[in-house]
Image: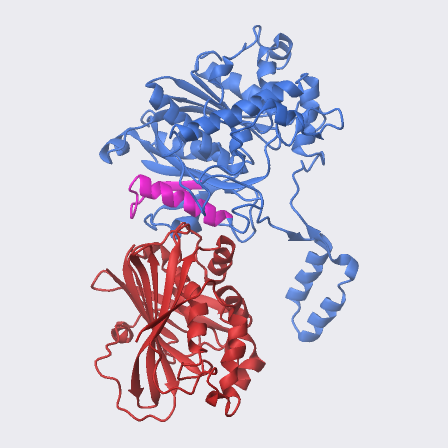
Chain colours: A blue, B red
Amino acid sequence: MTSPRRVAILGGNRIPFARSNAQYSSVSNSDMLAAALDGLIERYGLEGQHLGEFAAGAVVKLARDINLTREVVLGSKLAPSTAAVDIGQACGTGLQAVNYIGNKIALGQIDVGIAGGADTTSDPPIALGDKLRAKLVKVNNARSNADRVKALLAIRPTDISLDFPVNAEPRTGKSMGAHQAITAKEWGITREAQDELTVASHHNLAAAYDRGFMDDLITPYLGLERDGNLRADSSLEKLAKLKPVFGGPQGTMTAGNSTPLSDGASTVLLASEEWAKEHGHEPLAYLVDVQTSAVGYVGGEEGLLMAPAYAVPALLDRNGLKLQDFDFYEIHEAFAAQVLSTLKAWEDPTFCKQKLGRDEPLGSIDRSKLNVNGGSLAAAHPFAATGGRIVPALAKALKEKGSGRGLISICAAGGQGVVAIVER
Amino acid sequence: MTTTRQLSSAPGTLGLYGRAALPMIPGASRLPFVAGSASALPDLTLTLPEVRVDVAKLQAYAKVCGFSLRNDLPVTYPFVLGFPLHMALMTDGSFPFPAIGLVHMHNRIVQHRPISIGETLSVAVRADNLQPHPKGRTFELTTTVRAGDELVWEDVAAIFRAGSGKGPAPEGSEDPTAGVGALRIAPTEEWRLAGNLGRRYGFVAGDVNPIHLHPLSAKLLGFPRAIAHGMWTKARSLAALQDRLPDAYAVDVRFQRPVLLPTTVAFGSTETDGGGLAFVLQSASAKATPHLRGVVAPA
């Protein structure tokens, strides 16, 4: 086998993210993913083209969307010969889709592909309760009308219940915010530090829009031109007024320094260098390596969202790099406290010694290089769409700088984390 | 003299259907404010300025018709914007026919360019071209949509009114869809249409004609069951072709046979020599005349 090829990030397109039950309130995942893909097709002249594969996913997905991505391809202007796959790894879905397409390009299985993700919290799948479902299956299986009536009559009012998707870990029953509140307390993350990070996120994203940085990363959708959650006038004073929503009355996490439920979709165009050249696209940057790690959290042995703290050192070691060898850090702001806990863990000699088995801590990062064009606290976080928001924006920042290296870190439900290196 | 009447807002179609029923009362058409007494089409244009698309209504429409919701309006959506004007015109005292009982036979939409959701539009509607027909009379209901001064979209609905057929068949009215039958398009998609489709579409499109709403109301007007809206069949067909439509084109359809609900229909399409598309919608079970045949011709 030949050695792996370089994976070029050519660009991306997403729709502005909307807060839950706002502008995209009755829009489906497939509509949003199709809209994001449409814009990408138009921007990169992909109409009628056969691509290697389209990989995307949605975390909150309707049962009928089994083949969500393939259906989106068939409804798009891509050649119908473009294969597609649905993948899922909670909030890591988008970056894992980039990894999947990137690996196929690196190995020569495909020359070009699109990664993406979409999520709606406004159009959630609501399931029937188990009792009712079991009885309805019996009705459906009944052979005669008499049997059908009998099966129907067996349904009691108390059988009727609905299962709404909940933002809670199945094994602990605790919400992600409740988990993170424990971690934040363990690491002594203050309310002020979280609010500062939140303000920076909003100001950085607003500045990115104002200077036109987002122009070729985003396509307005249904009248929304900027992310609906963005508060350009965010300030410490305003955030200080909010009451804690996780961790009890003494908690530090608020609706301001936690990401809200939101709707949106994103896509990333990846290709081999040869394909990019043949089609006249200059790569923005290259995908170097991706690491996925997981931690046990069910018995409280580690914080639910701490897996990136383990994934990053593994990725650094494999690539012979230090934490300080980066020009940009894109740490997904699920909660401001998640970012700050992770950074603190890397600075902590005890954590690095006991948990990571390192003699030296990873150390600090230059905070002025963190989420320079805004993060999830400002843009919001439609779960599977976050990876596809970050990758093209980081690649573009590297292109603007001319050369350099960027680190991406995304935490995910189930105690998992996906991290990546991008360089130019 | 041409009269142009500008409406300040879209009239409610539910009330207009009440008006539309008035001519069914024997003798009512002699009243000057009830349609059905005049002998010629009024030289009247109704306009609605400053129309903006309500995204929530559009979403509901897209869902019922199967359109994926994009930044550009589904090609059939401006018809919905014009529909209140259609009803206002056809229930006007100067209109020669009662609105109930008119049959939409053929529909031509020309999209000069895609219309994006945020645009401010003006809509104008008028009726023209009253013609004799062997079994009654026909006329054309024209809807035009402008963005500023730019004509972006137009629709011509050919409408038939049964009556005493005095004249010969209208001359020179070429049907662009006439050749579709000879293409022998094999259906590739089956759609199961629920009994409440007429109510669902009627609600999102504002067309609450009783023939679409319920088997009982349809029976009162001579149909065995509720029938699907013709413009739904056109919209659903174009939704099936959404990824293959050019930016500027004309799409003609002929409504050949009503779709009685509930039912299963089959849809098929093929590319034509001119770089366009031809399509048919027919019953999934019987090999009868198709419900709809249509042609997309790029501009």
Q: Does the magenta stretch include residue A47?
A: yes
* Residue B125 in view, yes or no: yes
Q: Considering the image in quadrants, where does the C terminus of chain A appear? A: top left
Give the farthest residue toward the front.
Answer: B1
Query: Which residue is depicted at the point 68% across and 57% down?
Result: A133
Query: Which residue is depicted at the point 69% across and 24% down?
Result: A252
Q: Does the magenta stretch include residue A31?
A: yes
Q: How many labels does the image show?
A: 0
Residue A287 position in % (x across, y down):
39, 26
Residue A58 position in % (x across, y down):
52, 42
Q: Image check: B296 left or right of A236?
A: left
Closer-to-camera residue (A227/B68): A227
* Residue B189 in view, yes or no: no
Q: Image check: B10 left or right of B169?
A: right
Residue A16 position in % (x across, y down):
46, 39
Is A67 above or below relative to B142?
above
Is A266 above or below relative to B207?
above
Residue B1 position in % (x across, y down):
30, 76
Give the farthest residue toward the top.
Answer: A359
Q: Image check: A128 left or right of A122?
A: right
Q: Choose top left, top right, bottom left or bottom right for residue A236.
A: top right
Q: Choose top left, top right, bottom left or bottom right for residue B132.
A: bottom left
Q: Considering the image in quadrants, where does the N terminus of chain A appear? A: top left
Is A400 above or below relative to B125?
above
Closer-to-camera residue (B91/A256): B91
Q: Image check: B90 left or right of A196?
A: left
Q: What stretch is highlighted in magenta?
A: A29-55
